[in-house]
Amino acid sequence: MEYEGQICRAPMERSAFMLPVMVGCSYNGCRFCNLFRHLKYRVLPLEQIEGEIRRVQKAGGNPRRIFLGDGNAFDLSAEHLLEILERIEKAFPGREMVNMDATVTGILKKSDEELRLLQRHGVRHLYLGIESGLDDVLAFMHKDHSLAQAYEAIGRLQEAGMVYDAHIMTGIAGKGRGQENAVALAEFLNRTGPVHIVNFSLFLHREVPLYASIQDGSFVPEEETENLREEHTLIKRLNPAPGTVFRYDGFHDFIEFRVRGTLPDDREKMLEKLENAVEIYQNRAPVYSFVGGECPKLIKYEGEERRGNVWQNT
């Protein structure tokens, strides 16, 4: 497979056939993200996409699950996506679903008829970077949507027969606001009903615009113990609708901690695991998730502390 950049997809898609249809992210404006800043965004030509499909077909591949990459494939025009989907249908008769990352605005740009047509041609799961349940946090982080827009987009895609999976970030609201964000985010997720919830706790990356706000004090990061407490409150408040479940996967990669399970069945087990982690980290020096470099080979900067208005290594 020809691939430019680092592969980024939800853990649920690890066994899917990944078919690149673009390089980078057409939005690429989130202040915390370093995944695509070094790439020049472009849509891959259909000939290249078809060549990759043929390569897998000739090798005997007939994948059931296909993931379109890269950063926000659903933002491509409905016409272009349908051309790709028709080629997939022809080549892979065993295809059961085609999934991809999306943005709220990418969904809102499509008509209801286009959404239904894409669903009929195999689109099932859309992964949305919801990140926070607070409008002012979304605006500060330069997300491409408000909560009202997210409610509208999710309602429309569900009406068309697709499901959404939520990406969120503990720590994204900053120091002292983790509990507020957990409560607001739980309300949003309970109302919108994602199938999967994936929490990638916020990295404090030195090479993204957010770092300048950390340096000048306009964003004060939370340390990892509070991020764990925020996640605890979130999981405690998540209540899927009767007859449904939330599949939850939470990553705190800086401290190499992960909690996962199905809600509501695994709630107590997950809460206990978080409580044990809080017990460990609250008796240590504060840990901040400062990193540099490119994912997945991030460089950890440990011992970071605030001196006046500047964060420095100790």
Image (cartoon, rainbow, N blue to C red):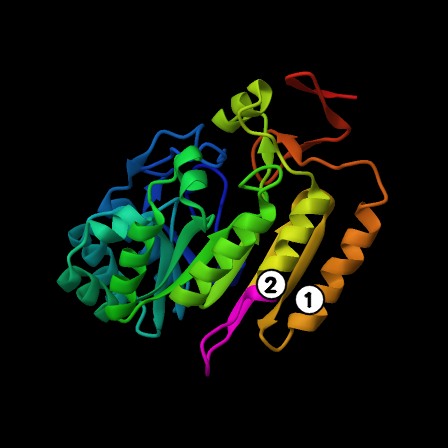
Left or right, 248 with respect to 109, comes to right
Query: Residue 91's x, y, as percent?
Result: 28, 65
First reached walking from the N terminus: tag 1 or tag 2: 2
Q: Which mark is residue 246?
A: none
Q: Which mark is residue 235?
A: 2
Left or right, 11 with respect to 106, comes to right
Q: Does 78 appear above or below 312?
A: below
- Magenta region: 236-247
Residue 17, by quadrant, is bottom left
Looking at the rendered image, the quarter that the C terminus falls into is top right
Which residue is pictured at 43% across the width and 37% down the height?
4
Residue 266, by quadrant, is bottom right
Q: Mostly what secondary structure, the magenta segment?
A: loop
Query: Residue 119's x, y, as percent?
Result: 25, 67
Left or right, 168 with respect to 289, comes to left
The one nearer the camera, 270 or 38, is 270
Q: Which residue is mark 1?
A: 270
Magenta span contains residue 152: no
Question: What SS does tag 2 mark?
Answer: helix
The one nearer the camera, 121 or 27, is 27
Q: Residues within 10 Å of mark 1 (few under 14, many from 20)?
A: many
Q: Amino acid at mark 1?
A: Met
Q: Residues within 10 Å of mark 2 (few under 14, many from 20)?
A: many
The one nearer the camera, 97 or 130, is 130
Asked if the residues shown at circle 1 and circle 2 are in contact, with their CB atoms under 8 angstroms apart, the answer is yes
Which residue is pictured at 75% across the width and 31% down the height?
302
Question: What SS does tag 1 mark?
Answer: helix
